[in-house]
Image (cartoon, coloured by chain):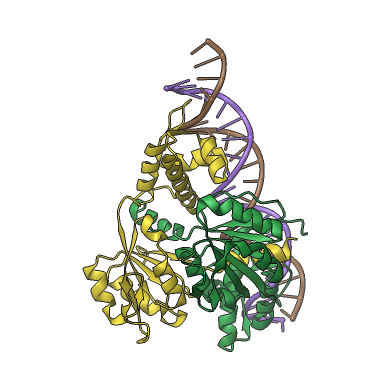
Chain colours: A yellow, B green, C purple, D brown
Amino acid sequence: MKVFKIPEATVMRLSVYSRYLNQLAREGVETVSSGDIAKGTGVSSAQVRKDLAYFGEFGTRGVGYKVDELYNHLIKILGLDREWNVIIVGAGKLGSALALYQGFAERGFKIVTVLDVDPDIIGTKLGNIEVEPLELLEERVREQNITIGVIAVPASAAQEVTDRLVKTGVKAILNFSPRVLKVPREVVLRNVDLSVNLEVLSFNLAFNR
Amino acid sequence: MKVFKIPEATVMRLSVYSRYLNQLAREGVETVSSGDIAKGTGVSSAQVRKDLAYFGEFGTRGVGYKVDELYNHLIKILGLDREWNVIIVGAGKLGSALALYQGFAERGFKIVTVLDVDPDIIGTKLGNIEVEPLELLEERVREQNITIGVIAVPASAAQEVTDRLVKTGVKAILNFSPRVLKVPREVVLRNVDLSVNLEVLSFNLAFNR
DNA sequence: TAGATTGTTAATCGATTAACAATC
DNA sequence: TAGATTGTTAATCGATTAACAATC
């Protein structure tokens, strides 16, 4: 356990940098400066260096960073150097959209189970995953070594599902329901609202101009 | 145009408050204090009052806020008191997931057009919207009075599609492609990365513990 | 009035930026 | 060496929190 706290904004930027480095690597670029990364990702070069400095010294003064080296460091820092098994609970509009989105797999997140309570939904296929009944939650989490749970159920069911996931050993919860969830301190919780991004846009359109 | 800048975090919290107030209203609650909202949404009560103070005085000292009144204020502030017509460009895995997700409609975002270049995708139905060819971009934006464009195309096509949208009068761009886009100052741009939420979790799992 | 809660100011905390010595 | 760029410190900026007068 590290003593200093890493700002969440830094973590999110590291993710952006890593994508950009991946792109550069595919283009055959071998070396970048913090200024290059800055221009490519829309932040300041001081920010890039500061963000990296939390984790070590990855560059060479006067020269810059080796693209593939820095990329590998970032992937390791972000915990993307392994595969994370993910369960999605709730296969309604949102849950099935998430299950169908393949961008997660590229970053090491493997959706291995999708559950629902609706008999009409159970048994349907989302890509190559079949939606299974909610009762299988504990069984699937255990046998598939699932560490991340995605909550895509209605608000009324969110806490109960979360409790079951946590009790069975899930270490992190990504909550898409509009409910403030209680989890033990050692479980990582993150709340997401898909349409908040559009709302920030509409706010800016309606208010600022 | 307001002179002071509203922190983006404030806007995102206003969105959270509005959802919570909506829930309270449905439960028949008539009055809330900043402390209630704080507990219900997981922030501090000072934060709630500070966020609201940017926009006016909505409460009564010693009493609190009227739930429906405050809700209506927030909806207005967020620009959700009207309908926004949205175009999604790109109907791949991500674009179609976004088109199928109905949560946007609840907040006033109406997806009216989905475009793609792939002949295999054009003509397929996403809910009740049919995917149409990219060539119709200008025509659809104009005739359907579209103000918000969602970029769900590969990085290589992102800037070109953005330029066409902006040129045709779209006022805001929600960019899901991993590309830093150039837009004129008056166009609102927001970059989103769906899997960054999972990456923040994996970072916390891998690094902090 | 006494109790409660807002709106707002001042203090604190944290994150970003500027600047530069270190060094390739 | 001269030029370039890192790593890091100190200065700045901005956001959150604590505290309290105003007031219902």
Instruction: Say which of A188 and B75 sits in front.
Output: B75
Q: Quadrant of residue A98?
A: bottom left
Q: Quadrant of residue B191?
A: bottom right
Q: Position of residue B186 (x, y in %)?
A: 72, 55
Q: Quadrant of residue A74?
A: top left
Q: Is residue B84 above or below residue B172?
A: below
Residue, x 42% and y 73% (percent of image)?
A: A95
Instruction: Say which of B144 and B22 sits in front.
Output: B144
Q: Is residue D13 left or right of residue B177?
A: right
Q: Residue furthest front?
A: B119
Q: Can residue B35 be seen in this snapshot?
A: no
Q: Position of residue B75 (x, y in %)?
A: 66, 74
Instruction: Say which of B109 and A58 sits in front.
Output: B109
Q: Is residue B128 left or right of residue B54?
A: left
Number of numbered callouts drawn = 0
Residue, x 65% and y 71% (percent of image)?
A: B85
Q: Can residue A5 be seen in this snapshot?
A: yes
Q: Position of residue D23 (x, y in %)?
A: 76, 75
Residue, x 29% and y 76% (percent of image)?
A: A137
Q: Residue furthest bottom?
A: B28
**The C terminus of chain A is located in which quarter?**
bottom right
Q: Is residue B1 left or right of residue A53?
A: right
Q: Is residue A107 above or below residue A202?
A: above
Q: Position of residue A57 (x, y in %)?
A: 41, 35
Q: Residue furthest left?
A: A143
Instruction: Say which of B63 and B55 sits in front.
Output: B55
